[in-house]
Amino acid sequence: MPTLVPDFWSHSGLMHLARDERGWLRPTDAYVRHLLRRPELALVPESCAAEVALHEGLQVAPLKPVAAAELAAMQDADARENYTVFLRFRDGLQAAGTLEAYYLQLMRSGAVNVPAVFIDAVVQALLRNLLDDCNDAFEARAAELLFRPQRITLQDGQMLAGDRATLDMLNETAGLGEVGRLLLQSGALQPTAQVQVLSADNAAQYWQESDRHHFLLDLTHELTQDLSHGLTFKMTRARSGLKALARVLERWVAHLMGVQVLIEPVHQVTDSAWRWHIGLDVESTAILNDLYQDRTVEAERMQRLVSLFTLTFANPAEMRADVAGKPVYLGLATNAEGVVRIKPQNLLLNLPLALQT
């Protein structure tokens, strides 16, 4: 019997998107309505008549043209700005034809003119599509790192990634809203986060609870540092979240760039003559750039590295000739506050391809 693939991330909007012959996602009226339900665009008691009229009009005809006068009639400046940005995003999607084309065009342009919430919504939809045949909860949870910032914490020798927004909310309210906030302030309730580490024993729960984003992902290495020769990592977990993340990144590259790559967390990096590297976030990009230029990297910054990876092309002929056959090194690091914010476009824009896709 075929394996039943669970549903997950109901908020991604995949059900409202259509696939073209390439398997890329075409925006639809239903998808635009789905976006209109975002909290940034939701009506509130203070919404003026002009805002209510525009919101209700877009619900009926999501792709209708909106005159500048309709936006100018809104009394609230924030609401006016939110709808202006939303319409720019909506029209960009329609002009590009697919979410994939829009994302690539936006990132390649170097002029990102929509806020992160909309970009993250696109990335989540893309990942939900390319993981549609996935029945591995570790890969699905690892994919969340590409569109939701994570807090990295050390607990009992484990390096754990937890959803930043979820952990912050639980630490502020214990998941009980304003009542929880008051109880925490009074000392009647301890700020314990209602989260659990994803494991083989509870993986089945992930699918039903995926929209809560409350599972921690184990990214543990046993770490030994040798700052004169790089970093040595020794894997200590049979079900490593780092390996799951590597599989997701492979799918990401294949879907959007059309090339097959193999990505592996590395146990040891001693290659002092590497030819190409890509930081998956701002911090690791800066660290790898400094190491590549033989600049000193302070121990405190080096310790922010969560992992390094090697990326190899299945077909070296698809690489630039001057680096063909050589590994590409990837880095993943936290910022000074212990937060990982992956920029998945980095992996697409900086691959050493012979021909741009």
Image (tube, rainbow, N blue to C red):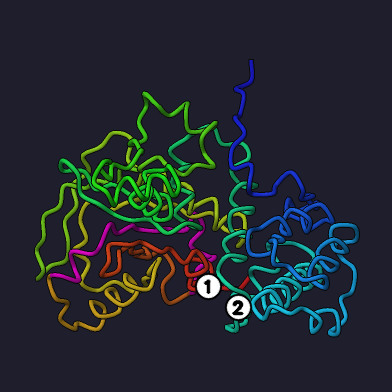
Query: Which residue occupies 78% across, 70% down?
Result: 51
Check whether the beta carbons of the residues at disc 1 and disc 2 lie within 8 A of each other: yes
Query: Dividing the picture into quarters, in which one does residue 135 lie?
Result: top right
Query: Which residue occupies 64% across, 77% down?
Result: 78
Q: Is residue 75 left or right of residue 353?
A: right
Query: Dividing the picture into quarters, in which one does residue 88 lie?
Result: bottom right
Query: Which residue occupies 35% across, 53% down?
Result: 172
Checking the image for residue 349, the label placed there is 1
Q: Amino acid at mark 2?
A: Arg
Helix, strand or loop under label 2: helix
- Residue 110 appears at what percent x and percent y? 57, 83
Residue 2's place in the image compared with 193, above or below, is above
Q: Which residues are magenta?
A: 300-320
Q: How many marks?
A: 2
- Residue 246 appears at what percent x and percent y? 42, 50
The residue tagged 2 is 108
Residue 7's place in the image compared with 241, above or below, is above
Residue 23's place in the image compared with 256, above or below, is above
Q: Is residue 179 left or right of residue 102?
A: left
Q: Nearer the viewer, residue 324 or 164?
A: 164
How many neighbours does mark 2 have within 10 angstroms: few (below 14), some (14-19), or many (20 or more)? few
Q: Nearer the viewer, residue 223 or 77?
A: 77
